[in-house]
Image (cartoon, rainbow, N blue to C red):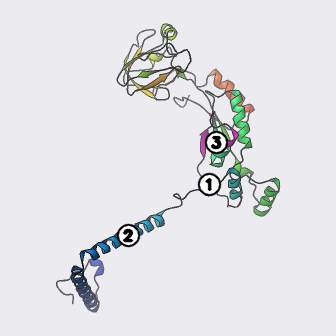
Amino acid sequence: ITPPHISFPPHHFFTSPLANMMLAHRTLRSGANITLRTARSTTRSSTSNQLASSSHLVSSQEHDRHRYFSSRSSFDLPDPRSFMSYEDSLEYAKSQKWNPQLSKIVATIGPTSEQLPVLKDIVRCGMRVMRLNFSHATVEEVELRMKNLRLSKGRHSIFTDEGEEAGVASTGESSVHKNVRAVLLDTRGPELRTGKLAGDHSGHETVHIEVGSTVTLCTTDEVRDGGSTASQLYIDYPKLHKCLVPGMKVLLDDGAIILTVTEVESEKENGTVTCVADNSGEIRSRAGVNLPGAETDLPAMSAKDRVDIKYGMTKDVDYVAASFIQNAEG
C-alpha cells in the first residue's frame, strides 16, 4: 500500500500493490540520500563551493556546445566547393553523384556579371535561367552574354568526349540534359517615364524629394521643355489625369519614391495630378513610372518589343517575359 505522504503522477501508478510498495521504498531511500548529501554539502568551505560552481559552469558550457554541434543540420555546413577554385570544383563534381537541382534560379546578367570569369561562377553556383533586360541591353551586350553563357560549364556537364561516352556506357544516361540553361528575354513593355531634370546636362544629376512634400505631375510640353523639379515632374503620358483618382499610388524609379494622389484635374485637357510624397529619396532624369491598379490605354506590346522579340528568335532564346501586364488581355 502506498504511504499517505507520497503521491505519484498518473503515469507512474501500478495496479500491483507489490509494485507500489517497491516504488515507495525507492522514493524514501532517494529522499534520505538527498538529505544526507545536503548535510554534507553544508560543511564544505566557501572555496570548495566556488570550485564546484566553476566546475558546474564549465560542464554546462561543454554540454551546450555539444548540443549546438550535434543539432546542426547539413544546411549549416559550408559547401566544400566554396573553398575550391573553379577547376578543382569541377573535379570534385565529377566524383559526386548527380542530384537534380530542385530550385531553378533566374539571374539577371548585366555589365557587372557578363564577363566570362564571373559568369562561370554564377553558373557553377546554380543559375538555370539567364535574364536579359532589353530595356537597357544593347545588341553587343546581349551577344557577349550569350556567348559567355555557352562557354560556362555547368556543375554537371563537365565531361570530356571520352568521359561522356564512359558515363553513358555505365549509366545509360547522357549528361547533356543535366546542363541545360535557358535564356529569358525580358521586354521593355509600355513604360512611362519622367522627363529630364532642369539643368541636368550630364544626365547624372538628381533632385531630392522630401517626405510629406507636394509633387505635381504634369504632361504639358512647357514643363517638359523647361525641365522637371522636385515639386513639378513631367510624365510622358498625356492621359495620366484620366486614369488616376485620389488615393491611388504613383511609384517613381521602381518604387524608390512613392507618391499618393490627393487631387486630379480630370476635366481639363492637360490636367495635372497633385500628390504627396510618402517617403524621401532622390529622383533622376528619365526615371520609370508605375501606376499600380490604374488602367491605361497603352499597348501590351510596343514597337520596340516586336523588334526585340524577332531578334531574340534569331538567337534561340527560350522565354519571353512581358512587362507591365494589366489584365489577361494585356
Q: Amino acid at mark 1?
A: Phe
- Quadrant position of residue 52: bottom left
Q: Please tell me whether residue 161 belongs to the stretch shown in magenta.
A: no
Quadrant of the image for the C terminus? top right
Classify mark 1: helix, strand or loop: helix
Q: Please tell me whether residue 111 belongs to the stretch shown in magenta.
A: yes
Q: Amino acid at mark 2?
A: Val
- Is the magenta region chiefly helix, strand or loop? loop
What residue does disc 3 label? 129
Could you classify mark 1 by the number of other residues whose Cα lies within 10 Å: few (under 14), some (14-19), or many (20 or more)? Answer: few
Q: Is residue 39 left or right of residue 233?
A: left
The first of marks 1 and 3 along the sequence is 1
- Gap in Å between the C-alphas at discs 1 and 3? 25 Å
- Mark yes or no: residue 268 visible: yes
Stretch in magenta: 94-119
Point out the residue furthest to the top here: 222
- Gap in Å between the C-alphas at discs 2 and 3? 51 Å
The picture places residue 306, in percent across and down from the top left corner, at 66, 25
Q: In the image, what residue occupies the spot 48% across and 62% down? A: 72
Q: In the image, what residue occupies the spot 71% across and 37% down? A: 146
Label at residue 58: 2
Q: Of circles 2 and 3, which is in front?
A: 2
Q: Amino acid at mark 3?
A: Val
Q: Of circles 1 and 3, which is in front?
A: 1
Q: In the image, what residue occupies the spot 37% across and 69% down? A: 58
What residue does disc 1 label? 83
